[in-house]
Image (cartoon, helix red, strand yellow):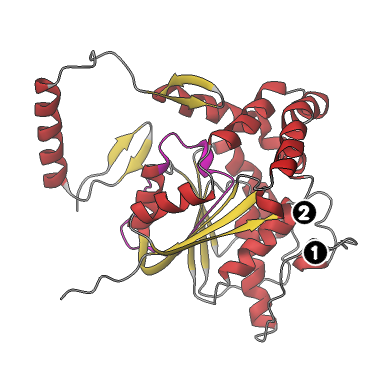
Amino acid sequence: MAAPLKISGFCCRNEKPLANFIYRFLSTNSATKNETRPKNESRETHFGFETVAEDEKEERVYEVFKNVAGKYDLMNDAMSFGIHRLWKDHFIHRMAPVEGTKLLDVAGGTGDIAFRFLQYIQSQNDDPIMVEESFSIPTNIEAGAYSIPSDYAEEEKIDLSGYKEDTSHVTVCDINQEMLNVGKSRAEEAGIFTGIDWVQGNAECLPFEDNSFDAYTIAYGIRNCTHVDKVLTEAFRVLKPGGRFMCLEFSQVNNLGLRRLYDSYSFEVIPVMGQVLARDWKSYQYLVESIRQFPNQKKFAAMIRQAGFGMVTYENLTFGVSAIHSGYKLLKVVK
């Protein structure tokens, strides 16, 4: 078994040492032949609308979510008019996990997706016959609608007191320890101590073996990663053959008139709300800008295909404010 490789403090498995050696050898030769970048010059990427060095972005994103961890629900309410809870419920219903599913939820430190996953599995055990409802935004949302417990609607409190341990399991992986701490506290308050693990790790270099999970989810996290292509490659690697990748993320509003209204709200209202409610203008300004820098629905679907996934689809939610992307790690037929 190959020794773990440490990158930025997080464990990344080095499963192909020979291939990596060849890659590094060729890369070194290429750099020697084409000495176009000084050795001390770092690659650049975006942090919102600001251009920064790649190694700087990860640290700055970490600080953003460290700052908002305690008010994560408030942040999502501001970004989505409070509809993010319905989107997340619909996300899990679209996944439709069955008992025995091994799920990896990346960038899910607060447990929003993990708890919904466990609740969905439990509802299957209680009532095996589940009728999927078409997703719409009702005008009179009640606390119990879309499987939200009665004490869940306001503060995202979890009520899984009836949860029974089965063979299903969710591993929550997040690079930010503060976000994981929030999720752990919520799990303890709900009495959930089994069926869930909490792992600090980098989405671009996951500390898991190949072919380990039946499903991979990432909700409102992938746009904050420096190398989205690496995140997708890692997702493909850790999924079992036949496993499903699902991403819930803010996306592009298709209607031009609605897009202008949403942009006005995003840039003129959300940072002000961040300052008033959380005394944090900069973090909310970054979050708004990061949405505009993320690829639109079609481009992101193409990136998912490029990573090796098949049967790639996407579904717009609320005119494209959010979108669900899905793909499968298909079995390759050897002829």
Q: Is residue 327 left or right of residue 123?
A: left
Q: Is residue 120 left or right of residue 270?
A: left
Crowd tier of the residue under label 1, counting other residues whose Cα lies within 10 Å: few below 14, some 14–19, many 20 or above: some
Instruction: Kindly identify which numbered label has been placed on residue 157.
Output: 2
Q: Secondary structure at mark 1?
A: loop
- Quarter of the image where the C terminus is located: bottom left
Would you name the residue on which mark 1 appears? 149
Among all residues in the image, which is located at the extreme bottom? 129
Pick whichever, 258 or 7, lies toward us.
Answer: 258
Magenta range: 206-228
Q: Amino acid at mark 2?
A: Lys
Instruction: Find residue 103 and report its horizontal and vertical position in percent.
Output: 49, 63
Instruction: Find residue 312 and report its horizontal and vertical position in percent.
Output: 45, 62
Within the magenta stretch, is there residue 214? yes
Pick whichever, 312 or 47, lies toward us.
Answer: 312
Instruction: Find residue 293 and report its horizontal and vertical position in percent.
Output: 54, 33
